[in-house]
Image (cartoon, rainbow, N blue to C red):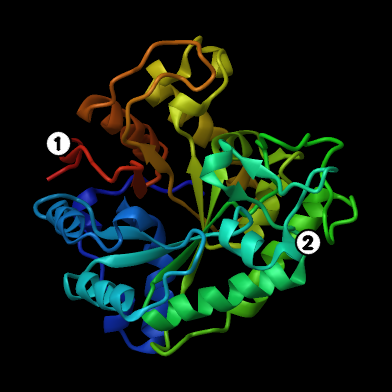
Amino acid sequence: MYRKHLNRRDFLFLIPAFLLKPTEAISESVSQSDKIRAAYLSVDHLYNPQKIEYIFSLFDGTELNAVVIDFKVDKPQINQSVKDLITRFHQRGIYVIGRLVMFQDSYLARTRPHLAIRNKNGDMCLSGRKTWQRYWVDMASDEVINYNVEISKQGIDMGLDEINFDYIRFPSDLSNCNLKNDIVYPVWNGHDRYQTMRRVFSTIREHLNGYAGKNNTRVILSIDIFGEVFAYGSEPGIGQKLSDIAEFFDVICPMAYPSHYQCGEFGLRDPNAHPYAVYSKTLEPGLKRLRTSGFKVGVRPWIQDFSIANIYGCGLVVFYGPKEIRAQIQASEDLGVTGFMLWNAANNYTKKALMR
């Protein structure tokens, strides 16, 4: 939703929810949740002491006040080590977001193969290279939904301030299954994809809305969506509709990476070369749509902090340094969006792009 532009100094220090009384934590968490500025810590580095110390160093003298950790990509990372890490972040006053990858779940597909979506030859559908083993499970399965709800509760019990849902959609890219006519779903019967995903969203909200966990605080629910969904309001192939998402989640996190837009999108030959324009043209129509519809939901975009060529092949590698990263953040702030989350798969970030 649209907001008056805020001065960064007004909210550099957030009061972590675990330091507040229960009733205070609920209102404070909701009001502050879209002012979060986070860096991402992947499961590949979740147990790497050197990388963890590097992540902590990013908070020294910068505007960052939060971290996103992978606590469920495939096998859930529910253990004492992760719980202790969450505590360490909290001791520094850092807000902790737990990223949960939902329907692209290789671990669940392998351990409960009856839940995997398959091609007509019986092979499990996967994204990317076969060696990556990125398999998908059925979006309409109560067993899958309930499994993820229970993991979310365990994450809340460990002390997470927010659950961030990713891949909570139908697949958009499969290397061995035709998206139109070559997928066999164990449960989904081909009915409206929007209705299927709306049911998923509502079930998650129903089961987690009143779950305060051991810390007795209401946990924020956020969702990662394609930039196109935010800009245009819906995407029928993956079953995501912005209005449904805004109804059931506290914060929407558009993934508007310029490198991942089709050549010519927004009239730009290579969107990757125009970070400010891409974020502006992605966020403005979505924000207007949310505002006119009366949805009170936070918006916090992911920011591209990596350098690659456009994935559709319309340009050379574009170097993303402080200027390019700051352009994305500035475009967001110019529209009243005060938070962001930095994405870099290797967890190497451009500290010079961050305000002191």
The dot on residue 352 is 1
Of all residues, the one furthest to the left in this rendering is 61
The C terminus appears in which quarter of the rendering?
A: top left
On residue 74, the disc is none
At label 2, counting other C-alpha atoms closer than 10 Å, the crowd grade (few under 14, some 14-19, many 20 or more) is: many
Residue 145 placement, left or right of 335: right
Residue with the mark numbered 2: 140
**Label 2 SS:** loop
Task: Give the secondary structure at mark 1.
Answer: helix
The answer to whether 19 is drawn above or below residue 259 in the figure is below
Residue appearing at x 45%, y 32% in the figure: 257
Across and down, in percent, residue 61 comes to 9, 51
The residue closer to the viewer here, 69 or 35, is 69
Q: Which residue is drawn at 57% across and 20% down?
A: 262
Residue type indicated by callout 1:
Lys
Gap in angstroms between the C-alphas marked 2 and 1: 44 Å
Residue 109 point in image, percent of width and height? 65, 60
> Of tags 2 and 1, which is closer to the observer?
2
Vertical side of 195 occupied by 121: above or below: above
Residue 80 x/y as whole percent? 32, 81
294 on left or right of 324: right
Does the residue at mark 2 contact the one at mark 1 (Cβ under 8 Å)?
A: no
User: Sequence order check: which comes first, mark 2 or mark 1?
Assistant: 2
Residue 42 shows in the view: no
In the image, what residue type sits under mark 2?
Ala
